[in-house]
Amino acid sequence: MTGPYDRRTAVLIVGGGITGLSAALFLTRLGVRPILVERHPSTAITPQARAFNPRSMEIYRALGLEEEIRGRQSILAGLPEMIGADTLAGRERFRVDLLAHVRPPATVSPTDWAMIDQDELERIVRSHAESGGADIWFGTELVSLDCDADGVTAVVRDLGAGAERRIRADYLVAADGHRAGIRGRLGIGVDQPGPVTHVAYFVFDADLTAALRGRRFLLAYLDRPATGTVLVPLRTPGRWMLAVPYHPEPGETPGDFSEQRCAALARLATGVADLDLTLVPPVPGWPRKVSHSTVGGWVAHRYRAGRVFFAGDAAHVVPPAGSYGANTGIADAHNLAWKLAAVIAGRAGETLLDTYEQERRPVARLTLETAMRHLTGRHGGTGKDVTAIDDLSMIFGYRYDSAAVCARTPGPDTPVEDPRAPSGRPGLRAPHVWLEREGTRLSTLDLFTGAFTLLIGPDGAEWAAAAPGHAWLDVHRIGAGLRDPEDRFCGAYGITRTGAILVRPDGFVGWRARDLPPQPGHRLDRALARLLALDARPR
């Protein structure tokens, strides 16, 4: 389809949840001004995801948002426990301090979990994306989409005014949620490794002081009225959400969950037979008090269809165990944004974009497996970690294997590395090491601000002399304005004092030289050319 068009843009994002908004923010910081359309009238109006892991916080920290995010944390920041029990008032199967279990030591990350409700985080991210130049249209739905070899043409409709606009974009990021309308239109299916559980959930007000017995939890996995029941506190004191599984096979339907039945289910779950409670709409003004969803997981067969990329729940869905869902979407957006920006700016070859699927799809499959194992351990189990991979390794230690990684030798067969014993191997997140600059403490991760970053050992001054001339490269030598007070840098990154390491804009190690080779400039040129899908060229 050819013009005329009402608007042209390098990147059109469909979906204004945390994945789409984060993609918009990351792109603006890299000099790309996307258009984002979202059919809902605003950012989320319910909490949705409520815990954002330290890797997500490292990403937002690099953009200067950490302090603002922590200033708007929810009541869950003071509710550390997760419990499993017959009923809330009954016998406990387990009780664990969940945050203590997954909190990284200071040698692993400069930051920590943020217990912020997703709707609050979305407002922060939207504000910064718009101030950076993103054009964000809420209340606007995608009507049609035509794809060709050079881009996409989208027709979008303003749901308030009814007016339609035609947008021409070089690329489209489909972050349109688990219903994945765009992926469905393009005929791309999913791998679904396990059964789907149907769940009815509702919000109610009640005084549960006696049943709580002083406990302060963020999640309760209950055996009644059925295995798989979950009770969570909401941000209004005395307000709770209860999710109860049901089984369509024998003929049970969403319509069977009347308000009277829901009240009875709440009394069974809490173990308080005469509990005085009031069902309330999940959102003020909504006519419905009972909602329905499914719990399960899948990963899309493909993450790319020509000029269209799938991210967040449009690419994968994981069950709500381990707080992986929204965090995985943020990492998708972070991985894709720098690659799109590099290609759009002419710094990289088009084939760099193929590495998005090569890197992120295996991570989604591994994440889904880990979350499913968590769910098994919490529903009817002891709550102990029954996963093959511990949470810290899953959050920080997953490994990329693609053309955007230059490794001299194949990496280990394991898909993750323990971040408590970092190696600095290409394909892994660059390790956190505390440094000092003019008396101020900072992390190596604070040096990764959107460009490629060359980190040089203390005796590798020749690397710094070879690096000028690359417009998209920041250079830092340990010992030249940056102190390594704990003498950890070389060991953590796996180099000698003359070595160097090249970190990609997303904070992952792309290439390293353990020591100083002949012609370091030539080696650096070749590494950058490969990472950016360009032919190696003489300087």
Image (tube, rainbow, N blue to C red):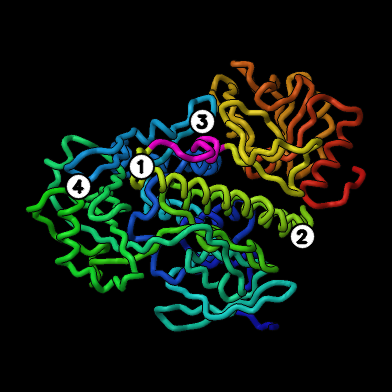
| Magenta stretch, residue numbers | 384-396
**C-alpha separation, residue under disc 2 versus residue under disc 4:** 52 Å
Tag 4 residue: 237
Disc nearer the start of the sequence (3/2): 3
Q: Residues within 10 Å of mark 4 (few under 14, many from 20)?
A: few
Look at the numbered disc 4 and give the secondary structure of its residue. loop
Disc nearer the start of the sequence (4/1): 4
Three-letter residue code for mark 3: Pro
**C-alpha separation, residue under disc 3 versus residue under disc 1:** 33 Å
Q: Residues within 10 Å of mark 1 (few under 14, many from 20)?
A: some
Tag 3 residue: 110
In the image, is 497 to the left or to the right of 32? right
Three-letter residue code for mark 4: Pro
> Toward the viewer: 409 or 10?
409
Residue 94 x/y as whole percent: 30, 36
- Residue 388 magenta-highlighted: yes
Disc nearer the start of the sequence (1/2): 2
Q: Are marks 4 and 3 in contact (CB under 8 Å)?
A: no
